[in-house]
Image (cartoon, coloured by chain):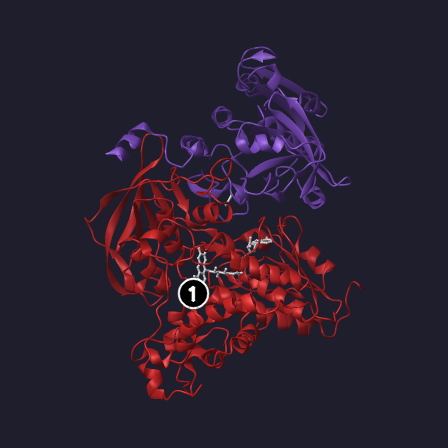
Amino acid sequence: MTALTPKERLAIDRVKMPEQDAKQRACNFTEVNLGLTQERAMEEAQRCIACKNKPCVDGCPVAVRIPEFITAVAAGNFEEAARILRVDNALPATTGRVCPQEVQCEGVCVRGKKGHPVAIGWLERFVADWAAEHMPKEHPPTTTTGFRVAVVGSGPGGLTTAGELARLGHKVHIFEALHDTGGVLRYGIPEFRLPKAVVDREVENLRTLGVVIECNVIVGRTLTVDELAVAFDAVFIANGAGLPMFLDVPGENFKGVYSANEYLTRVNLMGAGQDLKGGTPIARGETVVVFGGGNVAMDGVRTAKRLGAAHAICAYRRTRAEMPARSEEIAHAEEEGIEFHYLLAPLEILADAKGWVRAVRVQKMQLGEPDASGRRRPMPIAGSEFEMPCQIVVVALGTTANPLLTNATPALKLNKWQNIVVDAKQATAMAGVFAGGDIVRGGATVILAMGDGKVAAFGIDEYLKNKIPKHQA
Amino acid sequence: MFRVISNEEIAPQLNRMVIEVPRVARARKPGQFVMVRCSAGRERIPLTIADDDPKAGTITLIIQAVGTSTKEIVAVPAGGYLTDVAGPLGLPTEIERLGRIACVGGGAGTAVLFPLAKALAQAGNEVTTIIGGRSEQYVILLKELGAFSKQVFVTTEDGSSGEKGFVTLPLQRLLADPNQRPAAVYAVGPVPMMKAVSNLTRTFGVHTIVSLNPIMVDGTGMCGGCRVTVAGKIKFACVDGPEFDGHQVDFDELSARQTTYLELDDHGCRLDPQLAAMQKD
Ligand SMILES: Cc1cc2nc3c(=O)[nH]c(=O)nc-3n(C[C@H](O)[C@H](O)[C@H](O)COP(=O)(O)OP(=O)(O)OC[C@H]3O[C@@H](n4cnc5c(N)ncnc54)[C@H](O)[C@@H]3O)c2cc1C
Ligand code: FES
């Protein structure tokens, strides 16, 4: 194939992602984005002008060699692209689907200055899915070090560290509190955005690398970090964020009020809404109001729609421009008929005589001066209160650190938000104990948890270099 | 997979199951519970650990088989398996030496009370136990509790055993008698019973601890489904409890929240005739 001239590259329009029809998908849980064909992916890859400065690499929290993998895609060399990705990013099929590309790699792509950035996320996803289908499975390393590492939590942080350590020849044992793997990837992010088959694939891959995964072990309760630190040569903690925050308004405990974590866990992890006979139930309603404007709120409100709500409403204190959710999710939600009510804050949840939600009293807001986060602060408009009838309220305001593990582990150093303090190598105040992901950063992102996991894996490997394995195999 | 070592019916719809979970048996303290999922696709439900045998690596659960999930669990015979058992969860009971203590159990709550009462007695407290039930066959663990209690009172609603009436009758007498008044009361049972006990002890200013049983999903603090209002603040029963100061608990709210899924049809829609009518037009 002859290389295109820059002008020819600039002439190509950004590819369109084939999607499930909006009306149809609003009634099912299957993935919205259908994925690019090889031809479309190669064409999109040719839009990359291989600029000198590579701002996309700086824009990526884990510095994936984006131009290199895209050049390989453009040449139709998907295997090479997959190898590059695999080295830099342990979970490309996941991050290709859930990273906030518009504020990371794609946000700084030079092609975005005039027109649309290269669809880096979609290409990443394409390559990862292609590799899963066409490339042979990884083999466990032929030489092993004899070191054993315990990993707490099987979210993106734990999965990444486990994979990297296993490839380095260490024996890894993951302890997971829930009955299933994946952390937020399983219980939080819905099937229509991240098929659980993708998570299963990542977990299966770890098993072929020799990683042992044990569910139903709550570290801090079933076993302690101290016990793990004695029994294993090193420990990595990635137990995620934790406790959901509530609105702090009257009526929050009426029947029909859910945290987004509970709402999504019931559906995604427990299978509520699919087969109710004997399984985990979930309350449905004609009108569901979800408070919040992040990814979690989008997942909640789009789930409500799929559970049959005639009116699935997202109520947010600011405007669309300030919403922290991925722009693709907001766009998808709009297409699916989600109703957005901006500049609205809850005052009180009202119930009927039996204690079921019947409405939420809200107040209109206007944007004032920017606050500490740099976003304009919503200010209440006096006298603008009104009632929105609804049967279900979902609260998606974020989470605070879960103290279950840290309370049981006094030797760990915590910051004022009760997140674990680590150094540049993700090492905690306890020798041989490392940590990463949301428990260190507060609610963050999949890619950051993964990045931490990778740094920790190398930190642990280095830490083990001049040690003798505790248990000789 | 966790093996069921034994499973016997000790009262109507009430089973004692011994399960092999060595790590939980070792780590468990009185007042804590496990989350159990009978098999794939089923609910996760909290069950109090009634007893343990760390040497054998087993825990004992006493299960009132009233709902779909509990019925499925007690249907697993000895030699069978439960798919998931995770714990121990919740804060352990603060076992202090306070002197005279009254332990009040209602129905299957008596099973939850049993490990607390035992630990309190072992800590050197003088334990008076009051057990209530609908009728004689619902009065459970009488012998076991009698083994370490200074005295045991039984009440039944129909008078088929012990005193006819509610657990509050003997408790009232204890509270009213300065020579018998307990330093603290532990009450576990149906919400109306814990509420009645707390209201009674409040008038005597006697500290009262109750063990709450809201609906739970994960049991680790992640979902907030188990939230209860204590002293006007939201608490998560699974991580902040399950035991709380009975004088501070909003029992009416807890009662209401417990009925959530009983008032839904198979599709999760409310069984509310008015709402159904509204939805039609
Ligand atoms: C609904 C939702 C949507 C999101 N959408 C996006 C998105 O689109 N893009 C994005 O980048 N990020 C998104 N996020 C954020 C992202 O999922 C998290 O930042 C990321 O999953 C954090 O990874 P982690 O490995 O630190 O923790 P988690 O994914 O939270 O995993 C932690 C794991 O540890 C287990 N665990 C907890 N305590 C213990 C214990 N004591 N012992 C043993 N195991 C324990 C948990 O059960 C869990 O499996 C979303 C979050 C939610 C809730
Ligand atoms: S059961 Fe989920 S937070 Fe308590």
Percent x, y for residue A408? 62, 52
Is residue B93 depicted above or below A150 in this figure?
above
Front-most of residues A26 and A108 = A26
Q: Quadrant of residue B127?
A: top right
Q: Which chain wears red?
A: A
Q: Relative to residue A327, is residue A282 drawn left or right?
A: right
Residue bearing mark 1: A35
Residue A312 visible in the snapshot: yes
Residue furthest to the left: A383
Q: Quadrant of the N terminus of chain A?
A: bottom left
Q: Which chain wears purple?
A: B
Q: Which chain is home to disc 1?
A: A
Residue furthest to the front: A1
Percent x, y for residue A247? 37, 48
Residue A419 visible in the snapshot: no
Residue furthest to the right: A472
Q: Relative to residue B199, is residue B16 drawn left or right?
A: right
Label 1 within 8 A of ligand 1 by Cβ: no
Q: Relative to residue B68, is residue A145 drawn left or right?
A: right
Q: Relative to residue A172, is residue B278 drawn left or right?
A: left
Is residue A465 depicted above or below B92 in this figure?
below
